[in-house]
């Protein structure tokens, strides 16, 4: 897609400004504007056309937001185009040029799905993005993958994004952390689980207190119902008290409406119409009065003016006479001067006749003068031609003798065509010697580098040939082993963490159990069973003793050796009851101790299970390590971790690539050496055929130079001989021609002399008179006849002046006799002046009279308009009277006031009814009025106050009940282990939900980081070679060949990084580059990435916003050339406010002039 036109109809500082961007092979356009000229607004307008004007915009300072418009003509690569316009709004903002809405899919299709963020990042570059991209490359240390990915994505700071992902993930969870969100939540959840296990339920007392709580709660509910009923009654009375004033207002207004009776309701514009026509009537009456007086005054003034019509009838004649008066006076003045001129001419003619010396009766005719002029002109040219002819003959004869002498001294060499062909074939392959030397240097350098890389390669000892034959696992195999190692490591780390927590919990449980034992022996259910068993055994002995059938003394002694059986039995009963009471009384301690004992047993079992899992993981890890080592056995390498071996493989691959290059260089050396040998032998053989000896041990370049010298020498001699022969033939022909010309000139001069004598004899001159002398005589004759002509002209002028004066006096006399005979005795000049003055006064009076007539007509028109307005106003006011039944239109104002009063009363009633509806709480106005009937308004505040007091008393009672309920709930909460357990369980679920969210966010962040790293590595592996090669060429151009290209090499961490290559082969990392050079590196990567995109996608305009601030003139020119090359693939729009860059664009870049617009 490209932009054919941009029109800023009303946007920012622009109004109706259009930019036309014609399509060319080099689609490069420049928009120039000084600071504050609107360059930034133009850039925002372009993006607004594509994606819409932002809701909050700073470009509405000249035009209102609703009037913002930017238009354009766009065209895709197939030539299909559309004209569209964008306005500011929330919907239907895309329009055609007639402001009809267009569906957004039209421009989305032209944009090929490119979003606003992608357009700004990928198809636009500014000084800020250039600097940040350059800094990002520096921050990355020139990392190949991240630098290429960053440039390909428009300059995003990949390292910062990855760092933010890492920091956010670490803020959620760290394996050994305590303060992270997920770590704290896990600890909190463990604490809640411990408390849940230690809670126990109370006994019978809780049930009794719970029943009492239900009873008191019932009492509170009954009291709340009573309070609610009282509050509703209070609200009803309050509603009536608020409604009574409006009910009274409605009754009063209704009464006043009845008193008004039948009042005509007039329209809202009745008053405006009445006032309008009343005012029109008043103004028209005033106008009628003024115009009548004005007409009378004008008629009186017109009667006072008298215009002399006979004088005006002669106006044209009088004005003509006044104009001729000047000529008349001037003619009288010229008479004396003309007579003096005639006297002077008579004297001049007498002198000229004496100087000529011959009698001249007639003026020489033009034919004779022309012949003399022609013959005189030929005279000097013939003399000059004869002299030149003599000199040319002598010169040619001298040159011809010299050429013949030189030709005799030249020696013609043999045929050199074979030598020239051999020399051409040798040079056709270029500078083979230099190429061979350069290739050898490259071969040595690459061999050293390969050997050095092999030595540096860890885990391997051997030759490069052995390294090439090494069999290594596939990348998928390494990925699989790395994933399995990471899985086992993660599981072992999880076991370590769990065991650490379990040991800590075991110590905590033991301390708590020991604390309970220190506080006193904790009775258990087993203790109660034993006590009751002893009691039952004693009771059995007592029963047997009481029956007397058995001898139990020995058993009784065995039962209790200290006391007798009754006392011993009593002790066993007391002991059983005491154990039972303690179990009930110390139920919390009993339950807590039992819970701790169960928890301790569970921990022991978990540790046993964990140890079993650890053994399984250890076995699996050993098998995996063995399998991993087995994968590398064919290579004879004891491998490190998969991650480290991946880096090893990358270095191994790089070494193999360099090895291939070494083979290519070695083969190139052999080919060039063979070619040099063949060409050298061929040249030596050709020289021998020409009889030229040479040193066979000379270098190839020296031999080529010598052969060229031989060829040049032979060709120079041959060319010289041919040139000399041509020149000699030419000079011989010229000598013959000069002889013929010389003879012709002599004959022509003889003919001229005869013609000349014949012509000058007719003038009465001697035959030997020269042309200059004849010219002088002819000049004086011409002057003589010119003075005679001037004398005749002066005589005619005098005659004309006298004739014009007589005519003028006669015309004046005729006019005077017609209109002013009394002036006939005055001088002509005075008569004409007086007549002209009288004519001016007559014209002024005539104009004044005409103006008064015009004003009289205007006043009569004003009078007619006023009378028409009066009739129309009276008619309209009468119509208003008819509508309202008013007899006179003076009473219309009173009708209007009554109608307005009626409307006000109706509005009061309507407003009061609306307020009643709001107060009524759903009741109709009629229901509310009926409810208010018979209500004593004065007693309402008293009743409301009584109800409020009753409610206050009941609220106090309810508050007492609430306190009782609160006390019982507090006791129950202290006793209610089940409630605590429920609360803790609910709290545990909340914490568990928070843990789940944290885990999901943590996993998402880790996956994003991993996916981004994988995508960067994939982008590097797919694009490293082509992008670095293309970017290297662009970088070389941008740096004026200071660098020959770009390459990837390994840093101290065995990571591939970008380096610039000097022509000497030296590699410069990004840390060693200047800020400007890094800017140029990033620009090269951006353009190379953009070109790759354009090769497979629809072109999009590339917007370049003043990126050359830190470039010097030479590198700025180079950058502009690079951008112009890019414009052959897509449209490039370059914006700048630097006049110097504009000069560079205009003077040094393009084969065709770019489009330049100034804002």
Image (cartoon, grey):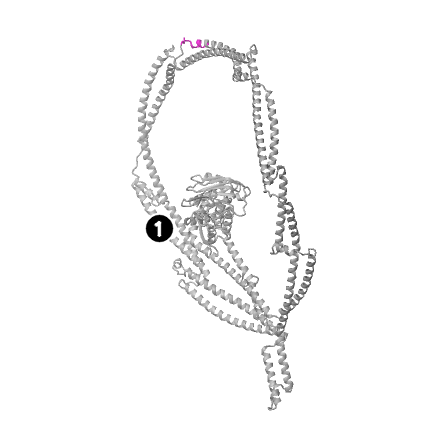
Tell which of 130 and 805 is nearer to you: 805
Where residue 225 sits in the image (x, y, percent)?
63, 64
Q: Position of residue 1139 (x, y in %)?
A: 51, 39
The location of residue 1038, given as percent across then percent down, is 46, 45
Q: Residue 689, located in which quarter of the rendered image?
A: top left
Q: Quadrant of residue 639?
A: bottom left
Residue sitting at 54 percent across and 59 percent down?
170
**Can you say whether 558 is above or below 1050 in the image?**
below
Inspect this view and state whether residue 887 appears: yes
Q: Identify the magenta region.
A: 351-361
Name the element at disc 1. helix
Residue 970 appears in the figure: no
Eyeballing the image, is 408 above or below 211?
above
Q: Residues within 10 Å of mark 1 (few under 14, many from 20)?
A: few
The answer to which of 599 and 508 lies nearer the viewer is: 599
Magenta-colored stretch includes residue 1030: no
Front residue of 232/199: it is 232
Left or right of 963 on screen, residue 188: left
Q: Please tell me whether residue 554 is drawn above or below residue 515 in the rendered image.
A: below
Front in this rendered view, residue 224 or 260? 260
| In the displayed structure image, the side of residue 1074 where residue 279 appears, left or right | right
Q: Count of labels shown?
A: 1
Q: Residue at x 59, y 23 (%)?
A: 299
Q: Which residue is mark 1?
A: 670
Image location of residue 520, percent across then percent down: 63, 75
Query: Does residue 589 appear to the left or right of 369 in the view shown?
Result: right
């Amino acid at each position: 897609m490209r932009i054919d036109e941009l029109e800023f109809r009303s946007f920012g500082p622009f109004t109706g400004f259009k930019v036309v961007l014609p399509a060319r092979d080099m689609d490069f356009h420049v928009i120039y504007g000084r600071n504050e000229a609107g360059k930034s607004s133009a850039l925002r307008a372009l993006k607004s056309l594509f994606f819409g004007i932002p809701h909050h915009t700073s470009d509405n300072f000249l035009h209102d937001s609703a009037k913002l418009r930017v238009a354009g003509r766009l065209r895709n690569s197939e030539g299909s185009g559309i004209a569209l316009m964008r306005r500011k709004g929330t919907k239907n903002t895309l329009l055609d040029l007639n402001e009809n809405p267009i569906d957004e899919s039209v421009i989305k299709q032209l944009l090929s799905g490119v979003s606003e963020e992608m357009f700004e990042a990928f198809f636009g570059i500014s000084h800020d993005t250039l600097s940040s991209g350059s800094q990002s490359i520096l921050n990355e240390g020139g990392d190949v993958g991240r630098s290429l990915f960053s440039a390909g994505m428009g300059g995003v700071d990949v390292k910062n994004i990855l760092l933010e992902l890492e920091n956010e993930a670490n803020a959620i969870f760290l394996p050994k952390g305590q303060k992270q969100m997920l770590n704290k939540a896990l600890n909190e959840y463990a604490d809640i689980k411990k408390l849940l296990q230690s809670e126990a339920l109370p006994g019978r007392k809780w049930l009794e207190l719970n029943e009492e709580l239900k009873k008191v709660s019932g009492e509170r509910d009954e009291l709340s119902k009573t309070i609610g009923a009282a509050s509703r009654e209070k609200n009803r009375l309050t509603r009536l008290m608020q409604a009574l004033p409006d009910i009274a207002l409605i009754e009063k207004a209704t009464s006043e409406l009845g008193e008004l009776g039948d009042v005509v309701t007039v329209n809202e514009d009745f008053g405006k119409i009445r006032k309008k026509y009343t005012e029109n009537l008043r103004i028209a009456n005033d106008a009628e009065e003024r115009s009548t007086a004005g007409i009378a005054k004008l008629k009186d003034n017109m009667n006072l003016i008298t215009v002399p019509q006979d004088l005006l009838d002669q106006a044209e004649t009088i004005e003509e006479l006044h104009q001729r008066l000047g000529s008349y006076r001037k003619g009288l003045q010229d008479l004396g001067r003309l007579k003096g001129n005639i006297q002077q001419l008579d004297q001049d003619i007498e002198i000229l006749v004496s100087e000529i010396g011959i009698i001249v009766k007639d003026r020489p005719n033009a034919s004779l003068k022309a012949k003399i002029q022609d013959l005189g002109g030929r005279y000097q040219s013939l003399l000059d031609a004869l002299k030149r002819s003599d000199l040319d003959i002598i010169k040619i004869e001298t040159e011809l003798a010299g050429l013949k002498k030189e030709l005799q001294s030249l020696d013609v060499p043999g045929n050199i065509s074979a030598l020239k062909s051999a020399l051409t074939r040798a040079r056709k392959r270029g500078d083979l010697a230099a190429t061979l030397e350069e290739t050898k240097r490259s071969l040595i350098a690459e061999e050293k580098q390969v050997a050095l890389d092999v030595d540096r390669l860890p885990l391997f000892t051997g030759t490069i040939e052995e390294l090439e034959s090494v069999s290594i696992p596939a990348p998928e195999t390494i990925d699989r082993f790395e994933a399995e190692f990471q899985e086992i490591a993660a599981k072992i780390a999880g076991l370590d963490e769990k065991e650490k927590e379990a040991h800590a919990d075991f110590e905590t449980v033991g301390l708590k159990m020991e604390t309970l034992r220190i506080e006193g022996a904790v009775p258990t259910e087993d203790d109660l069973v034993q006590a009751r068993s002893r009691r039952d055994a004693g009771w059995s002995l007592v029963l047997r003793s009481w029956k007397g059938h058995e001898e139990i003394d020995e058993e009784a002694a065995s039962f209790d050796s200290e006391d007798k059986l009754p006392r011993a039995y009593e002790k066993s009963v007391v002991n059983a009851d005491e154990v039972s009471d303690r179990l009930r009384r110390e139920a919390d301690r009993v339950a807590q101790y039992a819970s701790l004992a169960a928890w301790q047993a569970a921990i022991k079992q978990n540790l046993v299970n964990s140890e079993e899992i650890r053994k399984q993981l250890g076995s699996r890890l050993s098998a995996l390590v063995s399998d991993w080592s087995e994968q590398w056995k064919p290579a004879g390498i004891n491998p490190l971790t998969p991650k480290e071996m991946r880096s090893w493989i990358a270095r191994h691959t790089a070494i193999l690539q360099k090895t291939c290059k070494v083979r290519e260089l070695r083969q190139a050396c052999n080919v060039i050496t063979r070619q040099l040998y063949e060409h050298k032998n061929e040249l030596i053989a050709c020289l021998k055929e020409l009889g030229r000896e040479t040193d066979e041990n000379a270098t190839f370049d020296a031999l080529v130079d010598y052969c060229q010298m031989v060829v040049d020498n032979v060709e120079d001699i041959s060319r010289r001989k041919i040139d000399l022969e041509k020149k000699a033939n030419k000079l011989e022909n010229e000598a013959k021609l000069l002889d013929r010309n010389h003879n012709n000139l002599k004959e022509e001069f003889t003919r001229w002399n005869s013609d000349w004598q014949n012509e000058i004899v007719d003038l009465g001159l001697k035959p030997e008179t020269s042309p200059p002398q004849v010219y002088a005589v002819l000049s004086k004759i011409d002057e003589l006849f010119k003075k005679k002509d001037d004398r005749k002209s002066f005589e005619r002028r005098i005659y004309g002046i006298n004739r014009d004066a007589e005519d003028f006096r006669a015309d004046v006399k005729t006019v005077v006799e017609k209109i002013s005979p009394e002036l006939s005795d005055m001088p002509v000049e005075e008569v004409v002046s007086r007549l002209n003055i009288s004519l001016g006064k007559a014209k002024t009076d005539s104009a004044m009279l005409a103006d008064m007539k015009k004003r009289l007509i205007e006043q009569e028109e004003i009078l007619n308009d006023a009378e028409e307005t009066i009739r129309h106003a009276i008619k309209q006011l009468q119509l208003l009277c008819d509508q309202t039944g008013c007899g006179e239109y003076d009473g219309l104002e009173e009708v209007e006031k009554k109608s307005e009063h009626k409307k006000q009363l109706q509005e009061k009633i309507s407003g009061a009814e609306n307020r009643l509806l709001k107060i009524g709480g759903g009741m109709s106005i009629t229901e509310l009025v009926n409810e208010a009937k018979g209500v004593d308004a004065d007693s309402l505040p008293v009743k409301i106050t009584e109800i409020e007091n009753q409610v206050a008393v009941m609220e106090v009672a309810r508050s007492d009940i609430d306190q009782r309920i609160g006390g019982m709930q507090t006791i129950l909460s202290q006793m209610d282990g089940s409630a605590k357990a429920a609360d803790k369980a609910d709290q545990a679920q909340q914490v568990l939900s928070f843990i789940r969210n944290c885990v999901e966010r943590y996993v998402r962040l880790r996956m994003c980081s991993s996916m981004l790293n994988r995508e960067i590595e994939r982008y590097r592996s797919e694009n490293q070679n082509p992008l670095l090669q293309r970017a290297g060429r662009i970088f070389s151009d941008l740096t004026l060949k200071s660098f020959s290209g770009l390459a990837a090499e390994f840093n101290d961490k065995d990571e591939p990084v970008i380096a610039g290559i000097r022509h000497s082969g030296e590699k410069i990392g990004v840390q060693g580059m200047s800020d400007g050079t890094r800017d140029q590196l990033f620009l090269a990567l951006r353009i190379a990435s953009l070109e790759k995109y354009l090769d497979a996608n629809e072109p999009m305009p590339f917007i370049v916003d003043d990126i050359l601030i830190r470039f010097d003139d030479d590198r700025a020119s180079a950058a502009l050339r690079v951008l112009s090359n890019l414009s052959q693939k897509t449209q490039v729009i370059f914006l700048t406010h630097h006049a110097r860059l504009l000069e560079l664009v205009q003077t040094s870049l393009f084969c065709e002039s770019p489009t330049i617009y100034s804002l």
